[in-house]
Amino acid sequence: MITGSASSSSFSTRGPSCQPSSSSSTLLPMTRRFLPLLIGAVPFVMLVFALPLANRVEPIVLGLPFILFWIMLWIVLAPALLFLAYKIEKQASGSDDGEDF
């Protein structure tokens, strides 16, 4: 049988771990975590799922059928988007150790 009473100081709720966090402060890290994934998924979606929508011979763009121009456009844009996703991921992780890999 436990005797005695618990003092209010032993069950203090004042401290950094008990303060409520705002939804905006938890939303920012969540957005920075998934934004690189979304940016990295754009070229895949545009080359795989949007390709049937761009399957046209006409119009001719830069002397190429539209479908060929579409594929070449995303081949050029994909590395740029992946580099952007890499930079956002590196900034979000806070790795400033100088190593790129």
Image (cartoon, rainbow, N blue to C red):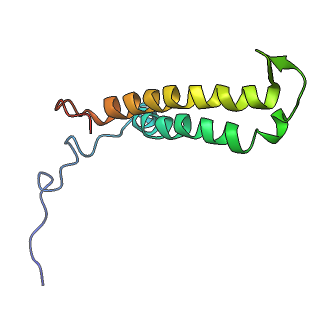
Name the foreground residue: 75 vs 15.
75
Residue 65 lies, in percent from the top left, at: 82, 26
- Lateral position of residue 76 relative to residue 83, left or right: right
- The image quadrant of residue 44 is top right
- Lateral position of residue 28 relative to residue 13, left or right: right
Q: In the figure, 87 relative to 8: above or below?
A: above
Residue 85 lies, in percent from the top left, at: 45, 32
- The image quadrant of residue 52 is top right
Outermost front residue = 63
Outermost top residue = 62
Residue 38 lies, in percent from the top left, at: 55, 38
- Lateral position of residue 36 relative to residue 89, left or right: right
Residue 81 lies, in percent from the top left, at: 52, 28
x 9%, y 70%: residue: 4
x 43%, y 29%: residue: 83
- The image quadrant of residue 22 is top left
Quadrant including the N terminus: bottom left
Q: How many marks?
A: 0
x 74%, y 25%: residue: 69
Outermost left residue = 4
x 15%, y 53%: residue: 8
Q: In the figure, 31 relative to 3: above or below?
A: above
Name the foreground residue: 13 vs 99.
99
